[in-house]
Image (cartoon, rainbow, N blue to C red):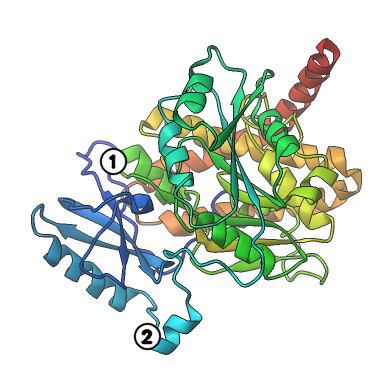
Amino acid sequence: MNGSDRRTAAACPCLAARDSLYTPVRVVELDLDEPGELRSPGGLGPADPDGRVLALVRLHGHPLGLVTATGTAGAPAALCRALVDAAHRELHVPSLSTATRGTLPDRTRRVRPATEPVTVSVVVCTRNRPHLLPRALDSLLRTAHPRVEVIVVDNAPDDDATEQLVRSRYPGRVRYLREPVAGLARARNRGLAAAHGELVAFADDDLVVDAGWVSALAEAFRSDDRIGCVTGLVMPAELDTEAQVALEEYGGYARGFTARSWSLRERPEDPLVRFSVGRFGSGANMAFRTDLLRRLGGFDTATGAGTAARGGEELLAFFRVLGGGHTVAYQPDAIVWHPHPRTMDALTRQVFNFGVGFGAYLAAAISHQPEVLAGIVRHLPRGVWRWQAARRTRTQGAPAAGAMAGLGRLEFRGLLYGPFCYLLSVWHQRGVRTGE
């Protein structure tokens, strides 16, 4: 489910009590190659924060973990020293020797590999949010990868503002497509059908993308021909509000700083791995071999945001890739920065939708592969128990433990609601196809 496989060696600010005055936390980057400089998320300019700071510590561009400190505006050197000290105290920091540099390539530099690089098509789906789109596209166009195709899919827009933005600001650099029927899965399928790259990646329209994101995804695929899907690290772009910190405390999107992979070719130690695919990553940061995803039929249009299912399209794709005999890999070097919901109302809606999407995914998995029903019925209760136990352990003693428990119950109710939402969405999609 959404909160499994937590990040390691990470210091995260605790959620304040609901009636307390929340103090914002500034999110920054610190690369130990340049220990005297802090950068804004995505490397978008220098940072001189005041107050509490959460830093993603990197070495030669590779993420090592998170540390915290308190800074004073105008005194960046002292804050950098405090963060560097915390990194060496709390994280495993490899030696900065020349030998280490040879084993950890610098992702901040554009290096053309010896073999011809693959073309990666990046699909950005959006709907009525032209004010957010430039930040995502600008960060994508800074990529260090030499062969990238950027596609914007405008999903059932109310006007032509997004089209005008793309055609006027990014002529010849970004392809514009329109998908007239609402639904994130439909928009992603539209981009998939038009993609020219051997790999296709998907990015949300409100993300900041790391300059090495595309290259890290491509390198992961190149490491093993059996890999069909790669996910990456999703970091909070900001922690300005109590709700944003609450999402990080509850589970967030991050899946840790250690590369991992999953396959069914050998009997997995955990029988739940086939179904609890949320541990692999999220739809905010994922890529596939283009021909494989097309053979699988793309994303189920009865799932995803914009439908009654509210999500689950990426989980079903992970499930089908894994079930098809391929490997799903998690590569933390592939980093994006995600803005979390800013209000508690928006947070509760999102957590409920997490549950609905997961329940819809399980129903969709059974719909596509009825033979898995017995396995889901046998393993799901134990999986839910383990998930709830992990939630209790992680939040026990926290100032907002009660609020976290409430979010857990809300997500569980969403999970129970999800299968009915999927059936409703299937019925609606049949009507849409009849209308087409």
Give the left or right position of residue 35, taking residue 92 as reference.
left
Q: Which mark is residue 15?
A: none
Q: Which mark is residue 240?
A: 1
Outermost residue on the front side: it is 172
Residue type at mark 2: give it.
Answer: Ser
User: Up-down: is 68 above or below 141?
Assistant: below
- Residue at 83 percent across and 53 percent down: it is 375
Q: Which percent across, then down, holds residue 270?
A: 72, 66
Give yes or no for contact between labels 1 and 2 (Cβ–Cβ under 8 Å): no
Q: Which percent across, then down, holds residue 334?
A: 52, 58
Q: Which percent across, then down, holds residue 298?
A: 77, 39
Q: Which percent across, then down, holds residue 412?
A: 59, 40
Mark 2, Cα crowd under 10 Å, few <14 / some 14-19 / many 20+, is few
Could you tell me which secondary element the residue under label 1 belongs to?
Answer: loop
Does any portion of residue 410 appear in the rendered image? no
User: Dividing the picture into quarters, in which one does residue 169 lie?
Assistant: top left
Outermost residue on the right side: it is 371
Could you tell me which secondary element the residue under label 2 belongs to?
Answer: loop
Q: Which mark is residue 95?
A: 2
User: Up-down: is 79 above or below 422?
Assistant: below
**N-terminal label among 1 and 2:** 2
